[in-house]
Amino acid sequence: MRAITYTESGGPDVLQLTELPTPDPGPGEVRVRLALSGVNPTDWKRRSTATPGGTPQTPNQDGAGTVDAVGEGVPADRVGERVWVWEAAWERTGGTAAEHTVVRAEQAVPLGDHPVELGAALGIPFMTAHRCLTVAEHLPRQLSPGSLAGVPVLVQGGAGAVGNAAIQLAHWAGATVITTVSSPEKAALARAAGADHVVDYRTEDVAARVREIAPDGVRAVVEVSIRANAEVDTKVVAQHASIAVYADDGGPEFSAPTRAFMALNTRFQFVMVYTAPAEAKAQAVADITAALADGAIRVGEDAGLPLHTYALADTAAAHQAVQDAAVGKVLVDVTA
């Protein structure tokens, strides 16, 4: 099978188009013939810093395709099922930038009749967003219509992939969704995703605008850049609010006013899906599946998530696009 691999860490140029044996699924596993692979920031960051241990590594965690073989203990009727895949390359060598990948059966989730582009865009972004919206004591453990009814939620960076996912999921759950962006073009994307209120942080006073919208403060913050936004978050959170930090855009360290957050009993939660509890991942998959069934999750320009598709041989360019902060979702067409 054709696959992208790398044997040393480095820039996108370490990615090579190679031929590998088509893998066979083991007990409890399925093999997926991939149509599209989704690229996330953690894919290029891992490629940049982690040297594979003697075995060529195929990158990318997310994808969509069709189950074409099953291992022992997996129902045979799963063969032919259209699925979306998550965490294919986590603690494995076979990611989704290949014609086939093998994952545990629960990591190949039924996609039904939804487009493969949508399936390949789910995975890490939507599971991260779900964790951010359910991680604190005062937030629901399960997202469903009405589970966040009337709850003010602030999504910092609403035009990014996780920001878009958070807007869509929070909107589906009934939250009052406020988001920040850096341009009118990104504001249009955030509104298309379902944001109720959009604040341009380059031209507006974010704290003042958020307090106008939510006088008692927001109950949850989905945070892409805590270093840049800690001061604003201090001014807009309600008592017992949570700030879920899923990225370190702007720098790896930050400072916060201890007393102010103590007085509010604010909860900081750092989020990385890969090491999240298994039950949290299972709930995310279940809720994303329910949102799909409700037609609440979409991709494309009219959903606030433009798609950028590259051929398999151009995976290096796809990684570079994500590293350069392409607005929207970067996909790799494994069949091209």
Image: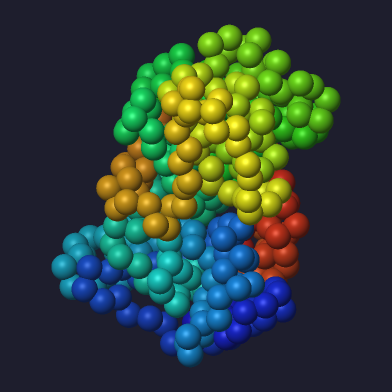
Is residue 300 rendered to the left or right of residue 112? right
Q: Which residue is drawn at 48% across and 22% down?
A: 264
Q: Which residue is drawn at 28% across and 69% down?
A: 29
- Indicate whether 83 appears above or below 239: below
Q: Which of 255 and 12 lies nearest the eye of the viewer?
A: 255
Q: Where is residue 102 in the image (x, y as percent from the top left)?
A: 37, 71
Looking at the image, which residue sits at the far left? Answer: 73
Q: In which quarter of the image is the C terminus?
A: bottom right
Q: Which of 279 and 236 lies nearest the eye of the viewer?
A: 236
Q: Residue at x 37, y 52 (%)?
A: 276
Q: Where is residue 123 in the image (x, y as percent from the top left)?
A: 46, 52
Looking at the image, which residue sits at the far bottom? Answer: 54
Q: How does the figure colour the protein chain or chains?
A: rainbow
Q: Where is residue 207 in the image (x, y as percent from the top left)?
A: 68, 21
- Indicate whether 288 appears above or below 192: below
Q: Where is residue 101 in the image (x, y as percent from the top left)?
A: 42, 71
Q: Residue at x 63, y 14 (%)?
A: 211
- Indicate whether 277 appears above or below 231: below
Is residue 304 rendered to the left or right of residue 84? right
Looking at the image, which residue sits at the far front? Answer: 259
Is residue 56 rendered to the left or right of residue 29? right
**Does any portion of residue 192 appear in the rendered image?**
no
Q: Which of 199 and 114 lies nearest the eye of the viewer?
A: 199
